[in-house]
Image: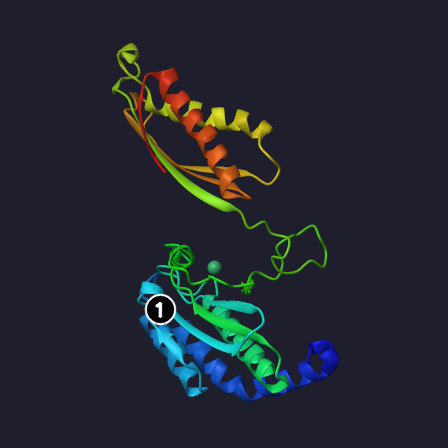
Amino acid sequence: MTISAIGIDDVRASVDLALEELHDSLRKVNHEIWSNPELAFNEHRAHDTICDFLEKQGFAVTRHAYGLDTSFEALSGSGGRLINFNAEYDALPDIGHACGHNLIATSSIAAFLALSFALKKYGIPGRTQLLGTPAEENGGGKADLIEAGAYKGVDISLMAHSGPKKVFSDQGDAEGIAGTLMNARKKITCGFTGKSAHAGGNPWDGINALDALVSAYNNVSVLRQQILPEQRIHCAFTDVPKVANVIPEHTEAIWQVRSPSLKGLNGLVSKVRNCIQAGALATGCEVQIKE
Ligand SMILES: [Zn+2]
């Protein structure tokens, strides 16, 4: 049987009813994760809470799946296509679940349960997978899972990320982050080393690390005219001189470079790297770049 033969309204109504019965226990799982924030790759309590819950619902769960201590996998259905849902559950250092990964976990669990229920009730061919994806604030847990083959054979991969209600102040009723670009991102840190000298007495003996940093920043500003509208480059000066009477010997900055695809990002990163190196070359500083 196909969904269209059954009628989508009927499916919706029975799925709603099934989830309504799980409402309280899902809420408990959500609060358990929210109240006990755990950092990347250390989400042991969240892992156990979700696995216990799924087993209680009658699902076979693979704990510590794909070589990751805090990942898990649950599968249901047979035949047809495979639809994956991703449950994130790590938090941010010092602030806890600011990003709402507890909500991501709960919505993915609910979606997995709803689809499992519908596949079974209507006898539709198809499979669904719930994957515990640790370390999404920091560490890239999904990258490890992809490499370990966790998404092999997946036809559709889904997840919902919570966000502020209003992101675009100039677009009236637009809500959520549907219009926000999800770019690939790389981080570059750079440190310039020159030679200190007295700025009033013998500045000609110095090699100015602040000039190198400012030149690098300005080189990137010039580059901006030729980058794609979707690409982003942003920077913070993290180590700069606090006095004006010394030719500064050392400065540091971090950059974030973003582009829709990894390929485009790598091209942009090499241009930014050139801008940074040019700042060093122009001023005679040494530069250390970490990507
Ligand atoms: Zn997030």
| 67 in relation to 216, above or below | below
Q: Position of residue 192 (x, y in %)?
A: 32, 27
Q: Position of residue 247 (x, y in %)?
A: 30, 20
Under mark 1, the amino acid is Ala
214 to the left or right of 177: left
Q: Quadrant of the C terminus?
A: top left
Relative to 166, residue 198 above or below: above
Image quarter of the N terminus: bottom right
Residue 199 visible to the viewer: yes
In this figure, which residue is indicated by the disc labeled 1?
A: 65
Q: Secondary structure at mark 1?
A: helix
Q: Quadrant of residue 83?
A: bottom right
Q: Is residue 139 above or below residue 51?
A: above
Left or right: 34 as drawn, with respect to 209? right
Which residue appears at 60% of the width and 35% of the height?
228
Give the quadrant of residue 143.
Answer: bottom left
Q: Is residue 242 visible?
A: no
Residue at coordinates 44% horizontally, 30% vertically from top-left? 270
Q: Position of residue 279 (x, y in %)?
A: 40, 22
Left or right for 78, reference 59: right
